Amino acid sequence: MLQTSPDETPAPAPAEEARGCLFALSQPPLMIFLAFIGTLLLMGAVHDLFLD
């Protein structure tokens, strides 16, 4: 069985840099995916408005 003394505490984990939504949106693969989805939605809207 592992024995530890009460005053022995584990070292705190290194704090990771806080990354928010703007960091996620700055990633090229995500922006390419969102642009592709936006293009599909735009093509569908144009098709419904003008070609139907």
Image (spheres, rainbow, N blue to C red):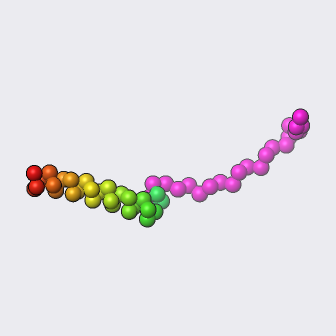
Is 24 above or below relative to 12?
below
Using the image as rendered, state which of residue 15 and residue 30 is in the foreground: 30
Residue 13 drawn at (x, y percent): 71, 51
Is the stretch drawn in magenta largely helix, strand or loop?
Answer: loop
Residue in view at x 10 percent, y 56 percent: 50
Q: Quadrant of residue 32?
A: bottom left
Residue 11 drawn at (x, y percent): 77, 49
Residue lying farthest bottom? 28
Is 49 above or below relative to 29?
above
Res. 5 visible in picture = yes
Residue lying farthest top? 1
Question: Is residue 24 inside the magenta stretch?
Answer: no
Residue in view at x 10 percent, y 55 percent: 51
Residue 9 drawn at (x, y percent): 81, 43
Question: Is residue 12 inside the magenta stretch?
Answer: yes
Residue in view at x 33 percent, y 59 percent: 36
Count of marks placed on residues: 0
Residue 12 drawn at (x, y percent): 73, 49
Is 46 above or below relative to 28?
above
* Left or right of 1, for residue 49: left
Residue lying farthest front? 52
Residue in view at x 48 percent, y 59 percent: 23
Locate the N terminus by quadrant: top right
* Left or right of 42, for residue 24: right
* Left or right of 1, for residue 31: left
Using the image as rendered, state which of residue 22 and residue 30 is in the foreground: 30
Read off the magenta span.
1-22
Res. 26 visible in picture = no
